[in-house]
Image (cartoon, grey):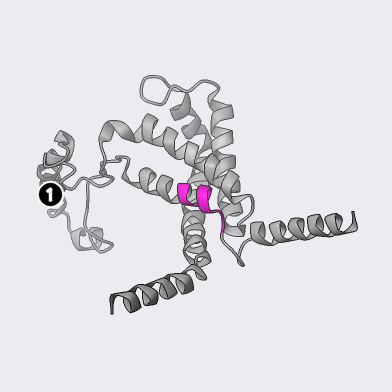
Amino acid sequence: MIHQSILFYQKLVTKLQRLDFIPLLLLRLYLTPVMMQAGWTKLRNFDSTLNWFADPDWGLGLPAPALMLSLVILFELGGGLALLLGLFTRMTALGLSITMLVAMGAVHAKNGWLAIADASSWLADGTVLYNEAVMAAPDKLTRVNDILQQQPDYDWLVSSGKFVVLNNGIEFAATYLVMLLVLVVCGAGRWLSLDYWLSRKVVGVATTQEAAA
């Protein structure tokens, strides 16, 4: 019985491996709009973003801020398109991974882990990590809602969803980093990527040349 179960499991794994291109495709499709939207937002707000990149007091204080911003925009817009096509995927994902690491360290790390301030989270209430700003968020949010409820259009204000406090921690950037690292290691996947078909063509040409030699 145990032997049969092991054989069944091995056969199931073999069949699942034939579908390994699907999760890689889904990762690419998920990351494409995220990266391209980030790049497009920076491009549309180039001047204000440049000031943030350059200013050492309230911004990042980066050297050569115009060049750095241009490279980030290029990475995010061009990289998002490359991920969609599955073209130079490992190189693209590696470049975007570096931008995520920089964002995590330079922008988000000081705010802890959580992207949204959730005082019930183990990553804010002291169970694993403690974040004083997150723990203070519910009182601030209650105060804001008390003020807003006095407005005649309060129902309209909350019709798109409840208000939250943005903590802007590393959560989202770290999640994208993990997804990108999967693509760095595994590539774009078979069948539905230009990398796959280009590699087949290269292998085919190399085989033909070896046979001719």
Q: Residue furthest right?
A: 212
- Near-viewer residue (11 or 67): 11
Query: Image check: 93 left or right of 206?
Result: left
Is 184 inside the magenta-drawn segment? Answer: yes
Q: Could you tell whether 162 is left or right of 43 in the image?
A: left
Residue type pointed to by label 1: Ser
Q: Which residue is mark 1?
A: 120
Q: Is residue 190 left or right of residue 96?
A: right
Q: Quadrant of residue 83?
A: bottom right
Residue found 35% across the figure and 72% down from its top: 6
* Badge 1 element: loop
Q: Is residue 1 above or below residue 70?
A: below
Query: Does 60 sit left or right of 139 as displayed?
Result: right
Q: x and y percent of residue 50 in the render?
A: 50, 30
* Percent of width and height locating residue 133: 17, 36
Residue 65 position (above or below residue 2)? above
Q: Which residues are magenta?
A: 181-188
- Tell me where residue 60 sits by quadrant: top left
Q: Above or below — where is 56 with respect to 180?
A: above
Q: Tell me if mark 1 has few (under 14), some (14-19) or many (20+) residues whose alpha carbon lies within 10 angstroms of its own.
A: few
The residue lying toward the viewer, choosing from 65 and 92, is 92
